[in-house]
Amino acid sequence: MQKIRLLLIIDDASIGGGQMHVLLLAKYLQGDKFAVEIATELDGWLVEEAHKLDIVVHQISISNNLKWKYFQNIRQILRSQEFDIIHTHGGTAGFWGRLGSISLKQHPVVVHTYHGLHYLNISANNKIKAIKQQVKSEIFKLIDRVILSYTDRIICVCRSDYEKAISAGVAIPNQTSIVYNGIEIDFFINPVCRENVRRIFGLTPTEFIFGNIGRLHEQKGHKYLLEAFAKVTNPARLLIVGDGELRDELITLANKLEISDRVSFLGARSDVKEFLSAIDVFIMPSLWEGQPIALLEALALNKPCIASDVDGIPEIITDGVNGYLVQPRDIDKLARIMNLVVTDRVTIEQLSTHHGTAIDPKFSAQNMALEVAKIYLGEN
């Protein structure tokens, strides 16, 4: 039986939720039915991990700038390889990948996944920036509406994204499916020895640790996290994993708030399981999200979670049952809950015992791949 040739396209290869999604999709689709390949930038975490799985990686160089060379780059790969299915991930890859497919003589099945509709979120703190963001948002919406005509199927990673996509006119109900992000649950359900990993991270056995994972980008709400942590009066530390354009600005803010001795910026890391095993509470104060993989990983490791009540997060966290939900930018409430969990060990234990209710099979990588395969084959 001839395998179905599948190309997964994502613009950025650095470690992140979208890249983890693509890697796990490739890992669990590769087999008897599908021959999976990935197109992404030359170097990065995704490239290294794909090579470990013997998955072919094609080099692309694309961005949001409209340049003919990006189209040529994508078109050359698509024309030379004759894929049966092209599956794009994220806005940049979604534009160039779907545009490139239009030029092919033999039209492949074209699928696009929204990992959060970021351009719909206007978060500028002044009027001029807000207007610019609104104009940009309308342009991106128009582009997505146009190329929707050349897309066979849209996938959203949570119901919130589905509803937003339909409302914005960038998806059509009968051509759109919800497939939740998945993680390798079996890998995460057993934590690493707490004492050992704390030693690795330079932590004492008894100090209380808040942990956060996310790009240092406005979306992730680190500014509000630092301001809330400055109001935490009980002894605690905050560890932040991730890198991005706001790193220097956030370090300066931590110094200004006089909490730099209690806050550590650890940069981008791949030892997520070890990090989560070392902390006491996972915290995610995002302004908007799709369906965050780091939150699923923290829950699988039985970590109490504090997260923003936005988008796909309430589909994972039930307030007061397996975590706490806080409105984004609500610094005072976030600080109150952080103070509460530091002192109330009973509450932490109660939250931890309910985590199993969130990590059901729909959040497994295997289920994610199975549902996506059904879409490829026209069974869903």
Image (cartoon, rainbow, N blue to C red):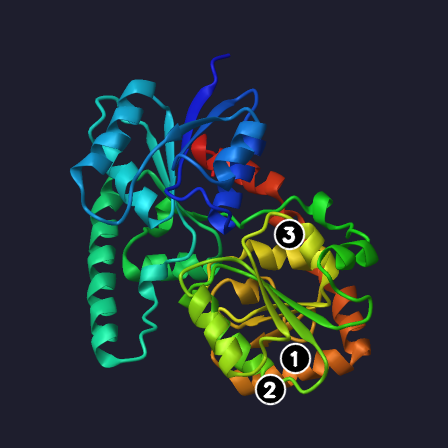
- Where residue 324 appears, as percent x and y from the top left, is 63, 74
The foreground one among 87 and 65 is: 65
Which amino acid type is marked by label 1? Answer: Met
Which residue is depicted at the point 45% across and 62% down? Answer: 160
Secondary structure under tag 1 reads helix
In the visual, does 64 lie left or right of 2?
A: left
Q: Which mark is residue 272?
A: 3
- Farthest-out residue, left: 68
- Can residue 126 be seen by looking at this rendering? yes
The foreground one among 167 and 198 is: 198
User: Is residue 56 placed above or below 277 in the rendered structure?
Assistant: above
Disc 3/disc 2 C-alpha distance (Å): 27 Å
The residue at which mark 2 appears reads as: 231
Q: Which mark is residue 338?
A: 1
Nearest to N terminus: mark 1 or mark 3: 3
Which residue is depicted at the point 80% across and 77% down? Answer: 345
Q: Residues within 10 Å of mark 1 (few under 14, many from 20)?
A: many
User: Is residue 298 placed above or below 65 in the rendered structure?
Assistant: below
Nearest to N terminus: mark 3 or mark 2: 2
Secondary structure under tag 2 reads loop
Which amino acid type is marked by label 2? Answer: Lys
Circle 2/circle 1 CB separation < 8 Å = yes
Which residue is depicted at the point 77% across and 77% down? Answer: 347
Which residue is depicted at the point 48% across and 44% down? Answer: 19
Mark 2 or 1, closer to the camera: 2
